[in-house]
Image: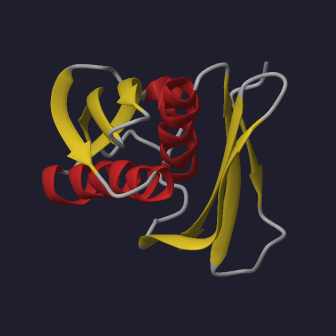
Amino acid sequence: MKRFEIDSELATADLMFRAYGKTIAQAFENAGYAMSEIMTDIKAVKPELKFTFKKKSEDLKSLLYDFLEELLYLHEARNVFLSKFSVELDEKNYSLKAIVKGERVKDAHERRSSVKAITYFDMEIKKTKQGFTVQVVLDL
């Protein structure tokens, strides 16, 4: 199963991706990989720094939004690129615990697109025969 796919056809200031997983938690992790890959080549980002956070929301879409928003906050406020994602998700309580790893942004890192915001536009979470698909549109 592929981790994610990026769709640049949506609009010039937006970028849509779909992330996949056998579980909803894995789909959230792969959404983290997709967003980070949009910003840089994550293969070049060492998992030297560890960040742990918890989120609780009113539904799964809000939880996905809050998760990605926290990743964007870490990138902006802590000046890091992230390259490893681990999510434990409680679907019934719409909560998660995440452990993410990465390193400080360096001149050697490739700079791709700058993500300004996560949006709810066309956001989807679908259960499929293979597992789960999440779809997210980023404002660039």
Q: Quadrant of the N terminus?
A: top right
Q: Is residue 26 above or below residue 82?
A: above
Q: Count every numbered label the image shows and give the total.
A: 0
Answer with the quarter of the image where residue 89 lies: top left
Q: Is residue 127 left or right of residue 96?
A: right
Q: Is residue 86 left or right of residue 24?
A: left
Q: Is residue 75 left or right of residue 108?
A: left
Residue positioned 58% across, 32% down in the render: 27
Residue 84: % across, % down: 39, 23
Specify whether residue 139 is in view: no
Q: Is residue 61 above or below residue 2?
A: below
Specify whether residue 28 is in view: yes
Residue 50: % across, % down: 18, 24
Residue positioned 41% across, 29% down in the render: 83
Residue 121: % across, % down: 62, 75
Q: Is residue 92 above or below residue 111?
A: above
Residue farthest toward the front in the current orientation of the protein: 92
Residue nearest the viewer, comparing 136 with 83: 136
Residue nearest the viewer, comparing 12 with 64: 64
Answer with the quarter of the image where residue 59 lies: bottom left
Residue 36: % across, % down: 48, 44
Residue positioned 54% across, 24% down in the render: 26
Residue positioned 44% across, 34% down in the render: 91
Answer with the quarter of the image where residue 37 lies: top right
Q: What colour scheme governs how the chains and residues are painted in the rendered image of this protein? A: secondary structure
